[in-house]
Image (cartoon, rainbow, N blue to C red):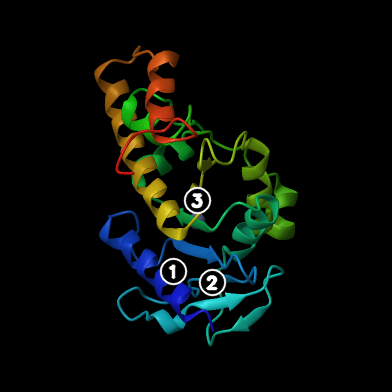
Amino acid sequence: MLEELKKRVYDQNISLVSHGLVVLTWGNVSARDAETGLIVIKPSGVAYNTMKAEDMVVVDANGEVVEGHWRPSSDLPTHLYLYKQYPSLGGIVHTHSAYATAFAQSGRGIPAYGTTHADAFYGDVPCSRPLTNEEIDEAYEWNTGKVIAESVTDVEAIPAMLVKNHGVFTWGATPEKAVENAVTVEEVAKMALFTERLNPGAPKIEQHLLDKHYFRKHGKNAYYGQK
Ligand SMILES: [Zn+2]
């Protein structure tokens, strides 16, 4: 079932490691099959070096396992919440990549300082509020999805979010795009940290330049890349 999508989800999970975004088993990629609405996600706690494509778990929109011999990632409810909230999403990524997580642990979003940021994100990448004790005790992973959604202004324009004291979630129309956004958010977090180190008063990118870079790659007048 969904063998091709399982292979893609597997490949993207492995690519988190090769991109240096994940150590041990921290992190996960999922994808939603547009036709059936079923979700394919990494199994929980299986080491990347022994994991295979057939280990990916298929679940329905309520998280019931449809196929697979492992338990799904413990972060599944966060993914389910976001898929439910945003029908356009085809892939979601979660990492604790160090630079972006440093911003999350500081309770800060990532300011848009330059064009690298503006090429992918139309403005600052926000950081969520902390979860309440009740939210942590009751349905921690589901409520993590809820606090993410509270801070999302436009799911397409800023396809990334920091969860306070925790880490990074990114998404996209495909799992490949969601991973690309996870790579980008880590890189711009690193650049932002060095920018502030070199110039603590550095201003954000001018709106005019932000618009230029974002809209040459996104929207109906985009012209970047090959036709
Ligand atoms: Zn996490």
Q: Position of residue 221 (x, y in %)?
A: 45, 30
Q: Is mark 2 within 8 Å of ligand 1?
A: no
Say which of 216 and 159 sits in front.
Answer: 216
Q: Residues within 10 Å of mark 3 (few under 14, many from 20)?
A: many
Distance from disc 2 to disc 1, alpha carbons, whole Å, reads 7 Å
Left-right relation of 80 to 207: right
Q: Residue at x 40, y 75 (%)?
A: 7
Secondary structure of the residue carrying numbered label 1: helix
Q: Residue at x 36, y 35 (%)?
A: 189
Q: What residue sits 72% from the left and 69% below the top?
A: 62
The answer to whether mark 3 is within 8 Å of ligand 1 is no
Residue toward you, 192 or 52: 52
Q: Quadrant of the C terminus?
A: top left
User: Residue 40 has which mark?
Assistant: 2
Disc marking residue 172:
3
Determine whether the residue tagged by mark 3 lies in a helix, strand or loop: strand
**Residue 12 lies in quadrant:** bottom left
Q: Is residue 36 above or below residue 210?
A: below
